[in-house]
Amino acid sequence: MAIRGGVPICWPQFGTFETAEDAKHGFVHQSGNWQVSEVSDDTVSLRLTPDAEMLKKWPFEFEFVYRVSLGAQSMNLKMEVTNTGSKPLEFTGCLHTYFRCESCTECVIEGPKGEKVDVGIGDVYRGIETEQRQKVTVDGGKSEVQLLYGGTTDAIVLKDGSQRRLRLTKMNMPDWVIWNIGKDNAHTLKDLGSGEQQKYILVEPGFATVPQRVGAGATWCGMHEVRAL
């Protein structure tokens, strides 16, 4: 089952990517095994370890800790994946961040100019085109938008029609993805109402173009911040 809104975690596979050994898409954001491990005034940490059913899908032992911290003008997201098994594990993924807006056609993303980009996301990263636009916009009307920027700058700015500005930053995640389903394909998302594809834009940090490899006993960490300007 897909999840719209919020920040679903796509892990240990990004979309239909085939670059990470033995990866499987999407099972952590569908899991009911997450447990609250720590709570403070502004932070909550969630912990996931695989049960027998999950190990049938992906035969690797791991501990996944997801920490969300809220500030007066910011939200910080941190992922830590520890390989608790005896063999290396590989994965790709992203934080599938949805931003609500009055109209995605009025949204502008600044920062990707000059970056390598796939226009249309497939099973592997191609990186054969270069973004020429100073300001990246989203149609939101007819056609689906799929943009994958690989090995990019860690900071970009998202503006909407009301001139709200968000600075998006990432650490240890090489990629940015911009996506909107578009009118033609909106019917494929059964929980989207008529015209609702215009009410969001997805700008997400990812680790898809280069699979992350974690040795036995080692930990991978990725961070993402959304800050109002």
Image (spheres, helix red, strand yellow):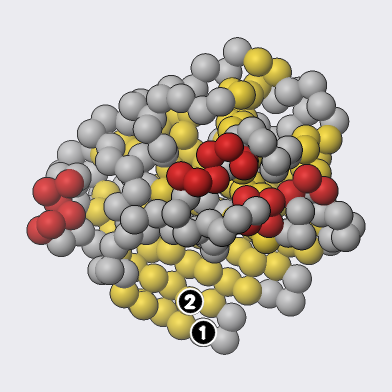
Q: Position of residue 25 (x, y in %)?
A: 33, 43
Identify residue type, mark 1: Ser
Q: Residue furthest top?
A: 128
Q: Quadrant of residue 35?
A: bottom left
Q: Position of residue 226 (x, y in %)?
A: 68, 59
- Nearest the viewer among 103 and 22 is 103
Q: Residue furthest front?
A: 194
**Could you give the CA–CA distance between mark 1 and mark 2, rounded to whole angstroms?**
6 Å
Q: Residue at x 58, y 18 (%)?
A: 127
Residue to which mark 1 is pinned: 40
Identify residue type, mark 2: Val
Residue to which mark 2 is pinned: 44
Q: Position of residue 86 (x, y in %)?
A: 15, 44
Q: Residue at x 56, y 59 (%)?
A: 193
- Nearest the viewer among 12 and 199 is 199
Question: Would you say residue 24 is visible in this rendering?
Answer: yes
Q: Residue furthest right?
A: 163
